[in-house]
């Protein structure tokens, strides 16, 4: 037998399998990537894995004695008193959390920076009790140079921006935002040296104290600092953009092998152009202010588990802080705010109870509480409609057995994750379900027995050097708060390592067989494969694993068109329906799908519901144009260089068009609430019922008829 | 020029050959003939001309020596009757014969290992006498540019930049492949160069290109710097790595030489709007883009581009000096050993276009030294330049012909009048 399985006894079971996997079995993959990529030249920042700092989204545990949570100060004390002592600097509380926040005992999800030793201790079976952390979401080590070394709280920001009563702030959280594009600039004395970006957080930048405002990760650039940079690098009427982005830390060829803003097309620039790009001569641009957040490249490029999403709490926190730093006629005001986050993934419970969804919910709810102004977060519904990453496995008394394959691709340098959720049931009868897992080329299966007992199994393979290598894990968690659904998770190493010849995960079909016990009643399982495809524009990295069922029809006929809806009579377990963005299932954000302008059909990739959140059963709230036509893919918006327009498609580009429209609505009625329901209502009004209107699960309320932002150029 | 299999262009000095490849017509095409025999006679025509001669020439009629006047000697009027490739050979001697080169052999003294390029000042020889039947010109070598290569440690640090720049290969592939040919293709996208409209401008740029290549290849040979793919197997350049050394970058040298020559040419008549700084800005951006694309491709270190830019800007000015009878009066040096090891290439450190339209002349610059470090670029005045140097009439003629192509056709000729009208001023716009 090629593989051996080791069941961990309860006391040795890590509590979050993805965090465990990222921190431990993935070590040699991170090391290989970093050495190869020259991200950290060996002599200035040695790749000592133990010294790497990780951004972790944690949910704080409740105190042992009551229903209050531990405070951040408690967490620090617990870390300091841990026995055996943790390495120095193991835990950094972001300086953005001020003294008062650090005393709060109503915490749910917060962000920390920590070393592996701390995170492993917190993730251990006794970690909740000993370090006060209920759950951990983390993905990849940060570039240490971008991290502020101190846990000390920062002084409150002393920079304010003056605005008019018409102003609306659009916050763009993205990667590769060329903020000096002329669509984000205004004119002064004939030169475009004024910026509409009031606050820019570049999480990629080297941490430094030179700026007006401190940041725990990267650097904050205020409007006046940006304008100083623009003026410095304007020569003969032309902006030397290479110089500007070098100074703003967005292009750094010395330290980074991937510099999005140096590319012709950059995701964040395109998205920001649609959300808030205005020609310098357009008067309305004056009152469309921008807060921009560049996410860290090292985290964005890693497609294992939750990557980008771990940054969302920090990003929303930045927005929440700086939306309060506006003045009008010298008086503090909080202008209306629309936030665009054009990212997503496939994983999660899809009911709004996931850690990322909760972080978003808390941030939005607190922002709304603190002011009476409209606040709206827009998320894309995702592009995974055809990705074959979702299956619905219904086990009944008549058909208590089902089989499905999970297909891992060769040369996948990112870990693959499959998560299978039980239905909502707080108590699962013992042995209600057994799941057998057979690896490619193997005969013997690993059996998971589902009940109220957790299981944590390592899949080992003997290395040529004689050592045992963990190539994957299979985990079962009984239901727990707040999701109350049991979860089976399988995590596999990449199927390729550019450097290390020890075993990797086998590519091919991982055969899964589900058998329900008699008398348990029907069980409807939902399986999702995590998105791990290389992001557009990034170097080859992850390759998408998927679910395979021979009954899944991809085309209407052999050689025919792609089927983008599940056939009504379909018997396949693999579904298009329900591929909606895993972090787009919460109650507050507006979620936007994409359609093709020329024929009015939903874009084939545009993912839809249903979700398992009763407040969002359909899935998306509305759809907007994501492709101009079948031939002209995508929509036009800003390329990285000033003056350039490029096309990009996906729900990433339909979403910011809605953000732009919403900003207009908010400007018109700045004191009226404006939220997700208003987006849905407008979609219904724009797209009244008619027989060929796409299903609500794909289009939400309907297809928004928004004016094309830059489409006139096509 | 390509090698025999036509698959490995040796730098942008495919130029002379590649001129033909990019355009089948006009002067661009004509340059394709450089170095090759003149137009090839089709056998059919030659056969016909033989029988034709037999058929009609009739009886031989002798000719008297006084019946044909001799051509004037050493006259530029002759140049306009010559084919472009023939003229190219003449320019080559005019330029090449005034360039000197020496390399200080390795020594334990750190001050050595300099490759030095000289300008040869010549003054007219005295008339021949019985005592001196073969008088020679008076000569004196003056420094033009000196270059010393970086250390292996610096190259090793620079290699990280090369590795990271590979990120842009997909984006830049079309440009990188097109730029295997002459920079003229990219400069002509900025200035209104067109074979029928500006044949002499194309010829002038090709001649400047020749000079750049002539000098840079000798420097590359002397400095013998290894290419990025000799340092690491992971660079994997996306094009052939040329056989010659890495520093200075030939593409950078040629592109900056030509960009500087072209902007000076455009401004010779003070025609609007070419004196606006944005024209120089754009030409230099273009040259820098060409240079950086070679790093993206994986065949050059950024320091190669820096050395190439300093060399190219120096040669651009020198070339215009030779064409306009100015005595070269400035020399430059590039000391690779003092190049900051992680420094990327930024053209603005070496040239400031300023805004000539406002009376601020463009300036070749040395990057500011941070106080502690030894500067790696230095400017030195040439001591006592010879003011009565032999003028190169052919180069002067070429410059004049090219300048005439940029005379304004605007009815308001006030600006042109101010500078001497006529379209044939020798155009000494400052650079």
Image (cartoon, coloured by chain):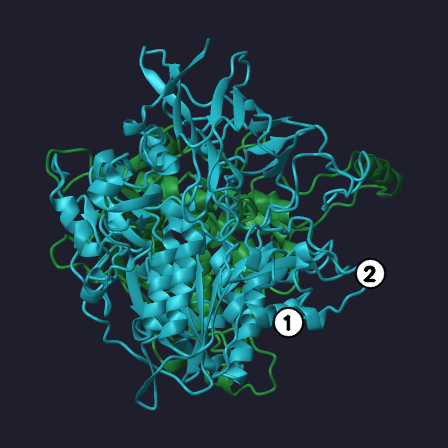
Chain colours: A cyan, B green
Looking at the image, which residue sits at the far right?
A: B55
Q: Residue at x 52, y 38 (%)?
A: A421
Q: Quadrant of residue A97?
A: bottom left
* Element assignment for label 2: loop
Q: Is residue A485 above or below residue A101?
A: above
> Can you see residue B125?
no
Q: What kind of element bears circle 1?
A: helix
Q: Residue furthest bottom?
A: A329
| Subunit that carries the residue with mark 2 | A
Q: Residues within 10 Å of mark 2 (few under 14, many from 20)?
A: few
Q: Which residue position holds label 2?
A: A691
Question: Which quadrant of the structure image shows residue A298?
Answer: top left
For the point 43% across and 87% down, which residue is it? A165
Disc 1 target residue: A681
Please give the count of numbered marks on the rendered protein: 2
* Chain containing the residue with disc 1: A
Q: Is residue B49 left or right of residue A230?
A: right
Residue A555 point in image, percent of width and height: 76, 38
Q: Position of residue B171 (x, y in %)?
A: 52, 48
């Amino acid at each position: 037998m090629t593989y051996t399985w080791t069941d961990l006894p309860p006391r040795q079971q890590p509590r979050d399998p993805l965090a465990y996997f990222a921190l431990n079995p993935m070590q040699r993959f991170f090391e290989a990537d970093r050495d190869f990529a020259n991200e950290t030249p060996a002599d200035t920042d040695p790749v000592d894995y133990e010294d790497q700092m990780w951004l972790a989204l944690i949910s704080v545990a409740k105190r042992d004695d009551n229903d209050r949570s531990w405070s951040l100060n408690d967490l620090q004390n617990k870390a300091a008193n841990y026995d055996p002592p943790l390495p120095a600097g193991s835990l950094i509380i972001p300086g953005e959390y001020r003294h008062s926040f650090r005393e709060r005992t109503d915490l749910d999800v917060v962000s920390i920076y920590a070393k592996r030793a701390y995170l492993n201790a917190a993730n251990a079976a006794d970690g909740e009790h000993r370090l006060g952390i209920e759950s951990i979401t983390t993905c990849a080590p940060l570039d240490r140079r971008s991290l502020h070394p101190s846990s000390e709280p920062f002084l409150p920001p002393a920079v304010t921006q003056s605005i008019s009563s018409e102003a609306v702030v659009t916050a763009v959280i993205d990667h590769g935002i060329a903020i000096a594009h002329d669509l984000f600039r205004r004119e002064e004395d004939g030169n475009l040296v004024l910026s509409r970006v009031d606050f820019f957080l570049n999480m990629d930048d080297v941490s430094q104290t030179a700026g007006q405002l401190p940041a725990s990760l990267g650097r904050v650039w205020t409007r006046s600092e940006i304008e100083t940079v623009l003026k410095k690098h304007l020569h003969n009427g032309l902006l030397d953009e290479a110089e500007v982005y070098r100074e703003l830390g967005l292009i750094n060829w010395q330290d980074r092998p991937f510099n999005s803003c140096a590319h012709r097309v950059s995701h964040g620039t395109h998205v920001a152009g649609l959300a808030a790009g205005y020609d310098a001569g357009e008067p309305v641009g004056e009152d469309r202010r921008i807060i921009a957040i560049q996410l860290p490249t090292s985290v964005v490029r890693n497609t294992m588990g939750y990557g980008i999403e771990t940054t969302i709490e920090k990003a929303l926190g930045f927005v929440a802080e700086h939306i309060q730093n506006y003045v009008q006629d010298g008086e503090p005001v909080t202008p209306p705010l629309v936030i665009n986050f054009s990212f997503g993934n496939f994983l999660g419970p899809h009911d709004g109870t996931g850690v990322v969804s909760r972080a978003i919910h808390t941030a939005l709810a607190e922002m709304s509480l603190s002011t009476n102004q409209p606040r709206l977060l827009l998320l894309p519904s995702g592009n995974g409609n055809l990705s074959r990453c979702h299956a619905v496995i219904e086990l009944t008394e008549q058909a208590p057995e089902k089989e499905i394959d999970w297909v891992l691709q060769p040369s996948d340098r990112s870990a693959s994750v499959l998560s299978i959720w039980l239905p909502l049931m707080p108590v699962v009868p013992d042995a209600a379900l057994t799941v057998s897992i057979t690896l490619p080329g193997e005969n013997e299966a690993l059996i998971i027995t589902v009940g109220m007992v957790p299981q944590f199994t390592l899949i080992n393979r003997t290395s040529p050097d004689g050592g045992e290598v963990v190539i994957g894990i299979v985990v079962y968690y009984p239901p727990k708060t707040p999701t109350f659904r049991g979860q089976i998770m399988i995590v596999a190493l990449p199927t390729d390592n550019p450097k290390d010849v020890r075993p990797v995960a086998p590519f091919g079909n991982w055969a899964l067989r589900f058998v329900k016990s008699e008398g348990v009643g029907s069980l409807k399982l939902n399986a999702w494969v995590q998105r791990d495809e290389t992001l557009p524009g990034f170097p080859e990295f992850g390759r998408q694993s998927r679910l395979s069922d021979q009954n899944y029809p991809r085309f209407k006929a052999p050689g025919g068109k792609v089927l983008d809806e599940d056939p009504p009579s379909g018997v396949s377990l693999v579904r298009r329906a329900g591929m909606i963005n895993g972090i787009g299932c919460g109650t507050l954000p507006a979620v936007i799908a994409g359609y093709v302008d020329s024929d009015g059909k939903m874009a084939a990739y545009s993912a839809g519901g249903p979700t398992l959140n009763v407040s969002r059963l359909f899935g998306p709230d509305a759809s907007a144009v994501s492709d101009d036509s079948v031939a002209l893919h995508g929509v036009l918006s800003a390329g990285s260089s000033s003056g350039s327009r490029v096309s990009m498609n996906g729900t990433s580009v339909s979403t910011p068009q809605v953000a732009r429209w919403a900003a207009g609505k908010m400007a018109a009625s700045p004191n009226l609430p404006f939220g997700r329901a208003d987006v849905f209502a407008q979609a219904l009004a724009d797209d009244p019922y008619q027989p060929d209107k796409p299903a609500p699960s794909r289009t939400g309320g309907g297809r928004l008829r928004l004016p094309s932002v830059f489409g006139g150029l096509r | 020029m390509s090698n025999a299999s036509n698959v490995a262009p040796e730098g942008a000095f495919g130029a002379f050959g590649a001129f033909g490849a990019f355009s089948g017509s006009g002067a661009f095409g004509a340059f394709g003939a450089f170095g090759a025999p003149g137009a090839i006679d089709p056998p059919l025509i030659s056969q016909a001309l033989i029988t034709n001669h037999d058929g009609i020439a009739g009886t031989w009629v002798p000719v008297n020596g006084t019946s044909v006047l001799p051509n004037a000697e050493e006259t530029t009027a002759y140049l306009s009757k010559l084919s472009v490739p023939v003229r190219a050979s003449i320019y080559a001697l005019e330029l090449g014969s005034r360039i000197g080169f020496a390399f200080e052999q390795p020594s334990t003294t750190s001050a050595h290992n300099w490759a030095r390029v000289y300008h040869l000042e010549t003054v007219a020889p005295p008339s021949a006498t019985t005592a001196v039947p073969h008088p020679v010109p008076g000569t004196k070598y003056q420094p033009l540019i000196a270059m010393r290569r970086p250390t292996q440690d610096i190259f090793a640090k620079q290699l990280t930049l090369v590795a990271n720049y590979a990120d842009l290969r997909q984006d830049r592939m079309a440009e990188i492949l097109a730029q295997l040919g002459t920079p003229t293709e990219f400069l002509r996208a900025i200035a209104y160069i067109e074979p029928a409209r500006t044949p002499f401008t194309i010829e002038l740029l090709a001649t400047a290109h020749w000079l750049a290549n002539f000098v840079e290849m000798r420097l590359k040979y002397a400095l013998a710097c290894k290419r990025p793919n000799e340092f690491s197997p992971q660079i994997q350049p996306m094009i052939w790595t040329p056989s010659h050394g890495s520093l200075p970058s030939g593409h950078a040298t040629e592109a900056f030489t030509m960009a500087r020559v072209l902007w000076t040419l455009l401004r010779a008549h003070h025609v609007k709007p070419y004196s606006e700084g944005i024209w120089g800005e754009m030409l230099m951006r273009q040259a820098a883009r060409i240079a950086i694309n070679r790093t993206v491709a994986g065949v050059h270190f950024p320091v190669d581009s820096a050395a190439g830019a300093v060399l190219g800007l120096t040669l651009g000015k020198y070339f215009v000096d030779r064409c306009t009878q100015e005595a070269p009066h400035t020399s430059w040096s590039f000391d690779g050993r003092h190049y900051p090891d992680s420094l990327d290439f930024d053209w603005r450190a070496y040239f400031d276009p300023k805004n000539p339209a406002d009376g601020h002349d463009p300036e070749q610059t040395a990057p500011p030294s941070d106080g502690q470090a030894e500067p790696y670029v230095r400017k030195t005045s040439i001591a006592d330049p010879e003011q009565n140097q032999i003028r190169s009439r052919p180069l002067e003629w070429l410059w004049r012909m090219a300048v005439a192509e940029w005379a304004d056709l605007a009815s308001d000729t006030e600006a042109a009048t101010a500078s001497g009208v006529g379209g044939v001023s020798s155009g000494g716009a400052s650079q």
